[in-house]
Image (cartoon, rainbow, N blue to C red):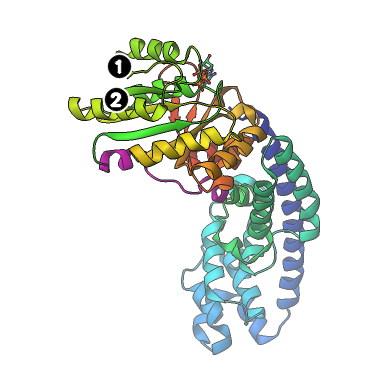
């Protein structure tokens, strides 16, 4: 799932990490040079070079930072990051002295596995320098933009991700990043998470809390796996102890009844159908009445997937809204449709406000563009991903899990 996108994102993070490493090395050399200068026999500089002796003995205002750093003496003596960190903070007393030194001290112990440069990276963050020059970052951001667009990520969403990465790596927010050697990945992770977690709510909880029967109506064009998804959700609810009745409100398409009937039969579920061409609202209404009479928990109502530009479609959904007032309207499309799915999500949401989306065929989608973009574009969350043709192949959409799978933990 989304393997092509994973590769592209990994290319970006390793390229920028390299750049950050180079900057870190430069910074390290600079700091070492500074330290040599500081080691000259001026009284205050001597204090920095030999903190155990000097700091407690001279608690003057401008040496408070050293004293703080020394409050937890480093076993390795003055050559530790804590010491040199405190030194650089003291050299620039204006810039938030104590906290960064503590951050850097905490970070240092985790940095061994990344080899060169990590202590220096922590130092760059702690001392308020940028992690990477904006200019150096720009060419990588251009590459990232291309990678996102070629993976079908919607333009405005790609721009949002780029802006987030840039801000996280060069702006004021970088201190929020955990410095465990994955600065760039963390920046990308945070930025991706922001766009794909839009509007998330607890689907199970909402269903549990609602008065029964809960009515869920499905919209979306034909051929994307809507019928299969309704069947998968019937199984999903059964697994959670909730009963369902299916309603075929797609009275427009020949063969729709048979298709849903087959799933209902396989899953041993009640299905309500009317003749082809009849009123979809009436079908779903009957299903709701059946659910009430038979103590059924959830009504799953299909609707026709005619073209989203059709006034008929809007009129149909409006009529369902007016007469049935469903608890949720979910938009279904296929992840593999990429930009088309994103555009349709926007148009369906404009036509008849949806509460969330389900993307089918994520298992067959190397790009991930729709999965990244739909929530941000509509302001409504993706709730499920279809991951295969079996009834159990439906995963709840967990933004954190998706981001982890895209860029590694
Ligand atoms: N690989 C994969 N195939 C799927 C998934 N969901 C549905 N399909 C397949 O997609 C094909 C179309 O699914 P249907 O449910 O019949 O789709 P549909 O005809 O769009 O249904 P309507 O939207 O109601 O018209 C079927 O072969 C399904 O098995 C999925 O998540 N992954």
Task: Specify the quadrant of the image occupied by residue 45.
Answer: bottom right
Q: Which residues are magenta?
A: 193-210
Horizontal placement of 28 versus 197: left or right?
right
The alpha-carbon separation of the residues under discs 1 and 2 comes to 7 Å
User: In this picture, is 26 found above or below 195?
Assistant: below
Whole-percent x and y of residue 348? 55, 39
Q: Residue at x 44, y 29 (%)?
A: 395
195 in the magenta segment: yes
Find residue 233 and report its horizontal and vertical position in percent.
Answer: 38, 26
- Whether residue 68 is situated above or below residue 213 in the rendered picture: below
Residue highlighted by disc 2 = 244
Q: Residue under circle 1?
A: 269
Asked if the beta carbon under badge 2 is closer than 8 A to the nearest atom of ligand 1, the reply is no
Residue 316 in view in this figure? yes
Q: 337 or 75: which is nearer to us?
A: 337
Disc 1 + disc 2, Cβ < 8 Å: yes
């Amino acid at each position: 799932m989304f393997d092509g996108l994973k590769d592209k994102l990994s290319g970006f993070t390793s390229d920028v990490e390299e750049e950050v490493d180079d900057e870190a090395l430069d910074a390290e050399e600079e700091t070492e040079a500074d330290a040599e200068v500081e080691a000259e026999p001026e009284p205050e500089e001597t204090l920095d070079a030999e903190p155990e002796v000097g700091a407690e003995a001279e608690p003057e205002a401008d040496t408070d930072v050293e004293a703080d750093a020394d409050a937890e003496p480093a076993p390795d003596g003055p050559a530790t990051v804590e010491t040199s960190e405190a030194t650089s903070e003291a050299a620039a007393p204006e810039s938030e002295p104590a906290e960064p030194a503590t951050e850097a001290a905490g970070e240092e112990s985790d940095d061994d596995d990344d080899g060169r440069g990590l202590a220096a990276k922590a130092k760059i963050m702690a001392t308020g320098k940028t992690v990477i020059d904006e200019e150096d970052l720009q060419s990588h951001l251009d590459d990232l933009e291309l990678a996102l667009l070629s993976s079908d990520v919607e333009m405005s969403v790609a721009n949002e991700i780029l802006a987030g990465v840039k801000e996280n790596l060069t702006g004021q927010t970088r201190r929020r990043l955990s410095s465990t050697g994955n600065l760039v990945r963390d920046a990308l992770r945070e930025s991706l998470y922001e766009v794909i977690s839009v509007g998330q709510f607890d689907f199970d909880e909402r269903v549990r809390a609602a008065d029964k029967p809960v009515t869920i109506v499905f919209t979306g064009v034909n051929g994307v796996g809507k019928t299969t998804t309704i069947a998968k959700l019937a199984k999903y609810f059964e697994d959670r102890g909730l009963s369902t009745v299916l309603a075929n409100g797609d009275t427009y398409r020949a063969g729709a009844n048979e298709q849903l009937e087959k799933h209902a039969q396989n899953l041993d579920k009640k299905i309500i159908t009317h003749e082809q061409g009849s009123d979809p609202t009436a079908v779903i209404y009957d299903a709701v009445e059946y659910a009430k009479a038979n103590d059924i928990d959830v009504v799953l109502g299909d609707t026709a997937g005619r073209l989203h530009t059709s006034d008929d479609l809007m009129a149909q959904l409006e009529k369902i809204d007016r007469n049935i007032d469903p608890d949720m309207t979910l938009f279904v499309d296929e992840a593999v449709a990429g930009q088309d799915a994103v555009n349709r999500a926007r148009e369906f949401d404009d036509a008849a406000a949806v509460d969330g989306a389900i993307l089918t065929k994520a298992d067959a989608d190397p790009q991930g563009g729709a999965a990244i973009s739909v929530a941000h574009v509509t302001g409504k969350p993706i709730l499920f991903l279809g991951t295969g043709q079996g009834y159990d192949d439906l995963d709840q959409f967990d933004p954190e899990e998706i981001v982890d799978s895209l860029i590694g933990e």
